[in-house]
Amino acid sequence: MNEGEINKLVEVLQHVKKRPGMYFADGIEPVDNFISGFMLGVQLTSEASDAVTQPDIIWEEFELKPNISIYQQLRDRGLDKHEAIEQYISILISHFQSLKT
């Protein structure tokens, strides 16, 4: 995955983060499905390795458990719906930006 592709992914995630209401309706919590689809799309449209689409290291950094709803883990920490969405997307942005180094 080249730097241009990474920048585009970060740009998309920043757009989602700024306008979560466009992607996540009130009363519905499709965040995990959206992120799963996003990561699958990344994997299918690029030469992305598992390290890109299954970032165990980043989950450890934020003390999150892989293969368990990240959104729910953030909610369980006391974040409200909007804070959890913002934090989740921030974690992914951080992950993709770390790939540029």
Image (tube, rainbow, N blue to C red):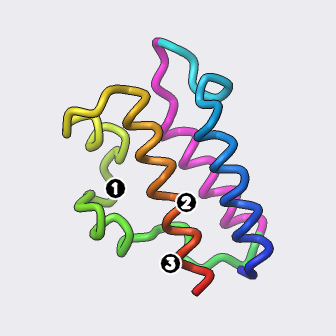
Amino acid at the residue labelled 3: Ala
Residue visible at 37% across and 40% down in the picture: 71
* 99 displayed left or right of 61: right
| Disc number for residue 67 | 1
Q: Earlier in the sequence, mark 3 or mark 2?
A: 3
Residue 50, x across and y down, in percent = 53, 76
Neighbor class of circle 1 (other Cα within 10 Å; few <14, some 14-19, many 20+) is few
State how far apart marks 3 and 2 are (Cα). Answer: 15 Å
Q: Earlier in the sequence, mark 2 or mark 1?
A: 1
Disc 3 is placed on an element classified as helix
Q: Quadrant of residue 100?
A: bottom right
Residue visible at 41% across and 46% down in the picture: 87
Amino acid at the residue labelled 1: Asn
Residue visible at 60% across and 57% down in the picture: 39
| Disc number for residue 93 | 2
Note whether 45 is above or below 20 in the view shown.
below
Disc 2 is placed on an element classified as helix
User: Mark 3 highlights which residue?
Assistant: 51
- Magenta region, residue range: 27-45
Residues at circles 2 and 1 in contact by the CB criterion of under 8 Å: no
Q: Quadrant of the N terminus?
A: bottom right
Residue 13 lies in the magenta-colored region = no
Neighbor class of circle 2 (other Cα within 10 Å; few <14, some 14-19, many 20+) is many
